[in-house]
């Protein structure tokens, strides 16, 4: 018998972010623009970020996808605002570890994001959850290493 | 209706998934395998495994006889006029790429046209995009009608005397639509073009007669028709295949090898470079025996019934959209749908937690998804082993999904 159930995946806070996404839309004045999609399922994210002096000043996302991918994008933008690019990437790595079911550093405050830990029980959905984070990492990387 | 006992022939179906008896509704992606196919592959490896077309020894002869015997079964299965017209490949994708790279490069040039449709699978789009880019030819699309069918008038308008290749799927992997291949082939031929058919969703489910269709090439995969993965077929008319160059060179496919020049074996072997997919072909032969024992017409009727039953049951659910033709006579056993306000991934996860396997995503048909105005859809696809009870379980599962997400449905 199965010991996992839907409530472990679809926590209340996730559904709240899905229904009322934070930072939805597009930043008006330029900054970093990253488009990424998940070719296996069609999920798509359009992320705009303002990074100044190594600090993520603002971030917004737009896109289409399932509850997990959109809630994760909403939480991600909320979490990285005001953080240094370095800390944002560190958080993304921690998020990846959480998806793999690894134990996390106790000092790390994940806030709402912790609610996504149940996704690790649903291997087919991990890519949904990590899409926005991958886009953010790509943006930070392109800011640090412009062509 | 096909007897429910057929389910017992598929060992994998006898299991619990997430605490519920498995209902497998993803045969459009790959079918499950009956005992006879699994046994045929096992028997081959336990008794006859050897390379083909070279051994003087007994095992080599047995393996060759079985491999070539499977080719004859395929030829009979699709009513090819000669066994030489049956080439074993890795699957539909490889078959279509072979046509594009061999026939296409030799016969398509700048200013020519290649015609496909808006409902094609990526495997019947990208080989032609690449060929068009390489040759300077134009790739043209026949749009679909709002009911998810193709209009022959639109095909007439799109195909011209510049068209060299028309390539169309027989059955849509998303809409379930059965396309009028014979009529499209007639239009193609009238303009001097060859007709290529992506038969991936047709060969497993309905009686295919390549001579009656009068298609020039017909591609399909074994794994969607009870056979192992990794084996597929390219049928081609002998006169065309004889003039075509191989696309893979090496062992197995040669007649004479000199230092700077070589010559090829005769058909079909010149297209089968390297050690062939022997066990896969033998498995395909066993799958064909199995399907013919049931009867392709029975399978077609069974799936059409299940699709009609599913559409009836699903239409009772508010906010559920079904894509493709409403008339069951125009479609095969594929029902693609969306539940209002719930993303298909979420629907598929809820169904999976209830033991029901469906596909969610773009189904390797991104241009079609765009045309339908959907980024993703969920799909239930049926095969011989599915029953009305499976459809009932699907409908129940959809109600659970709807209920579960009722808080967030806008």
Image (cartoon, rainbow, N blue to C red):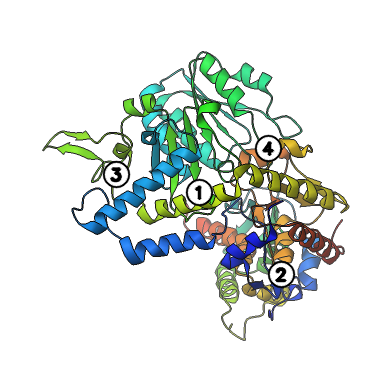
Dot 4 and dot 2 residues touching (CB under 8 Å): no
Is residue B89 in view? no
Q: Which residue, given by chain and number where applicable, does mark 1 sit on?
A: B288
- Percent x, y of residue B89: 40, 44
Dot 4 and dot 3 residues touching (CB under 8 Å): no
- Pointer 4 and pointer 2 on the same chain: yes
Which residue ends up furthest to the front in the rendered image? B293
* Mark 3 or mark 1, whichever is nearer to me: 1
Mark 3 and mark 1: Cα distance apart in space: 24 Å
Between residue A38 and residue B54, name the one nearer to us.
B54
Mark 4 and mark 2: Cα distance apart in space: 30 Å
Q: Disc 3 sits on a residue from what chain?
A: B
Mark 4 and mark 3: Cα distance apart in space: 35 Å
Mark 2 residue element: helix
Q: Quadrant of residue B87?
A: top left
- Percent x, y of residue B127: 46, 36
Mark 3 and mark 2: Cα distance apart in space: 44 Å
Query: Is the N terminus of chain A in the top left, top right, bottom left or bottom right quadrant?
Result: bottom right
- Percent x, y of residue A97: 56, 75
Upstream in sequence: badge 4 or badge 1: 4
Mark 3 residue element: loop
Q: Disc 2 sits on a residue from what chain?
A: B
Q: Which residue, given by chain and number where applicable, does mark 3 sit on?
A: B273
Between residue B3 and residue B203, name the one nearer to us.
B3
Q: Disc 4 sits on a residue from what chain?
A: B
How many C-alpha atoms fall within 10 Å of the one at disc 3: few (<14), some, or many (≥20)?
A: some
Q: Which residue, given by chain and number where applicable, does mark 4 sit on?
A: B177
Between residue B185 and residue A96, name the one nearer to us.
B185
Upstream in sequence: badge 3 or badge 1: 3
Q: Which residue, given by chain and number where applicable, does mark 2 sit on?
A: B353
């Amino acid at each position: 018998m199965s010991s996992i159930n839907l409530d472990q995946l679809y926590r209340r806070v996730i559904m709240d972010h899905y229904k009322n996404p934070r930072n939805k839309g597009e930043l008006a004045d330029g900054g970093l623009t990253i488009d990424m999609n998940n070719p296996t399922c069609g999920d798509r994210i359009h992320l705009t970020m303002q990074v100044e002096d190594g600090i993520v000043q603002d971030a917004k996302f737009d896109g289409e996808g399932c509850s997990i991918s959109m809630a994760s994008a909403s939480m991600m933008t909320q979490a990285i605002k005001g953080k240094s690019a370095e800390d944002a990437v560190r958080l993304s790595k921690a998020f990846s570890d959480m998806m793999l079911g690894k134990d996390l550093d106790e000092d790390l405050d994940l806030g709402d994001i912790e609610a996504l830990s149940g996704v690790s029980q649903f291997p087919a959905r991990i890519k949904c959850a990590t899409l926005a984070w991958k886009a953010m990492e790509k943006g930070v990387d392109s800011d640090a290493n412009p062509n | 209706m096909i007897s429910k006992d057929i389910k017992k022939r598929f060992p994998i179906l006898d299991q619990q998934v997430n605490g519920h008896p498995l209902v497998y509704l993803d045969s459009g992606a790959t079918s499950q395998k009956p005992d006879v196919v699994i046994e045929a592959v096992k028997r081959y490896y336990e008794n006859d495994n050897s390379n083909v077309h070279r051994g003087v020894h007994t095992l080599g002869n047995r393996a060759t006889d079985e491999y070539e015997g499977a080719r004859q079964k395929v030829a009979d299965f699709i009513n090819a006029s000669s066994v030489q017209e049956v080439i074993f490949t890795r699957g539909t994708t490889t078959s279509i790429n072979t046509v594009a790279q061999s026939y296409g490069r030799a016969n398509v040039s700048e200013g020519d046209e290649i015609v496909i449709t808006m409902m094609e699978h990526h495997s019947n789009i990208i080989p032609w995009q690449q060929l068009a880019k390489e040759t300077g030819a134009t790739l043209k699309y026949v749009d679909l009608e709002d009911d998810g069918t193709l209009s022959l008038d639109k095909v007439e308008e799109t195909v011209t005397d510049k068209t060299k290749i028309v390539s169309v799927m027989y059955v849509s992997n998303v809409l379930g639509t059965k396309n009028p291949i014979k009529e499209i082939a007639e239009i193609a031929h009238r303009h001097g073009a060859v007709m290529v058919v992506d038969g991936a969703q047709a060969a497993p489910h309905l009686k295919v007669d390549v001579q009656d269709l009068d298609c020039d090439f017909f591609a399909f995969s074994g794994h969607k028709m009870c056979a192992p993965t990794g084996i597929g077929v390219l049928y081609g008319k002998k006169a065309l295949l004889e003039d075509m160059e191989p696309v893979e060179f090496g062992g197995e496919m040669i007649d004479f090898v000199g230092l700077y020049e070589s010559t090829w074996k005769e058909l079909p072997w010149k297209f089968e470079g390297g050690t062939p997919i022997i066990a896969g072909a033998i498995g395909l032969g066993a799958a064909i025996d199995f399907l013919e024992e049931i009867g392709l017409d029975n399978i077609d009727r069974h799936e059409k019934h299940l699709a009609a039953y599913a559409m009836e049951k699903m239409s009772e659910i508010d906010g559920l959209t079904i894509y493709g033709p409403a008339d069951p006579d125009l479609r095969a056993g594929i029902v693609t749908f969306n539940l209002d306000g719930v993303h298909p991934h979420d629907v598929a996860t809820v169904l999976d937690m209830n033991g029901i396997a469906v596909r969610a995503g773009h189904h390797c048909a991104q241009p079609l998804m765009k045309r339908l105005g959907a980024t993703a859809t969920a799909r239930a696809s049926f095969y011989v082993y599915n029953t009305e009870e499976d459809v009932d379980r699907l409908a129940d599962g959809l109600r659970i999904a709807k209920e579960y997400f009722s808080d967030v449905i806008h």
